[in-house]
Image: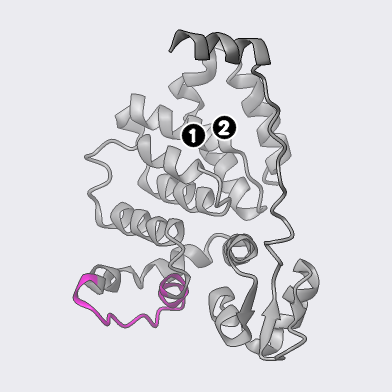
Amino acid sequence: MDETFDQLSAKVAEETEGINRYNPGNIPLLEKLIDAMVSEKKYDKDVLLTTLKLFQLNTQYYNEPVVVNILLKTMTVFPRNDFAIAKYLLDTDKISTPEIKAVLLLGEILETCNFPVFWSIVRGDYVAREGNDEKYRSMSHLQKLIKSIPGFEDETRRYVSSVVDCTFQQLEKTLLAKLLNVPVSKLPSYQREKGWLDSKTDNKYVFIANHEDSVKSKNIDEKMTFESKLSIISDF
């Protein structure tokens, strides 16, 4: 019977304690833990970044499929900066392969909140409309990779929702559905989860948040005494 994420995590914690943190002998165990992380929809930033560092220090053990999974997993916690940190742990000669270049570009699309393009690539139906979009054409094969990460699409929708929350006061339902990559008929469940309400003035829109209500005035305490002001004035 395969060991669970929790069991493997306990082993890794024991094996990587102290000076053994970057022992290359731990790489096989870390790779097993990452496999369990993927299959069980778990997440451990420290394990992912430690594995990348070990690959960087011991290039003979570099494992591109594992790196692809690491990068994809770090995308599931946007808007955290885990993906950015992971990128910096990849040497320049490793990011030039077609697979890694494609995954990094996919992450860039998410980082820049280009959600319609992202979802079309995930679905495999993206059609380049402009010359500078040609680079996206080669990414259709990533659909299978993304599908191999359980929960990836749901976590991306969580990220989209967080961006929508802090960006819009109200949004047309058709656009919101496009951003979430769901049918308009499925929006009510997302609205209930996020507390988004139908607009009272137009039911084609969803009320997201009144950002004006969240802006709070701040009292600024005057730290300078009257005597100190007189002293400054006298200097002139």
Up-down relation of residue 43 to residue 172 (above or below): above
Query: Which of the image's four quarters has the C terminus?
Result: top left
Res 109 quadrant in image: bottom left
Q: Nearer the viewer, residue 184 or 47?
A: 184
Residue 202 horizontal side relative to residue 159, left or right: right
Q: Which residues are magenta?
A: 117-132
Protein image colouring: one colour
Q: Which residue is mark 2?
A: 46
Residue type of the residue flagged with mark 2 = Asp
In the foreground, 194 or 213: 213
User: Mark 2: few, some, or many residues within 10 Å (few <14, many ≥20)?
Assistant: few
- Tell me residue 220's x, y (percent): 68, 33
- Name above or below for residue 132 compared with residue 54: below
Instruction: Write the residue at 57% across / 32% down.
Output: 46
Mark identifier at residue 49:
1
Please tell me whether mark 1 sits on a helix, a strand or a loop: helix
Q: Is residue 68 left or right of residue 59?
A: right
Q: Residue 119: say if magenta.
A: yes
Image location (x, y in percent) of residue 197: 77, 78
Q: Are marks 1 and 2 in contact (CB under 8 Å)?
A: yes
Question: Is disc 2 placed on a helix, strand or loop?
Answer: helix
CA gap, disc 1 and disc 2 = 5 Å
Three-letter code for the amino acid on which mark 1 is drawn: Leu
**Rendered position, 1 above or below 117:** above
Q: Position of residue 218 (x, y in %)?
A: 70, 41
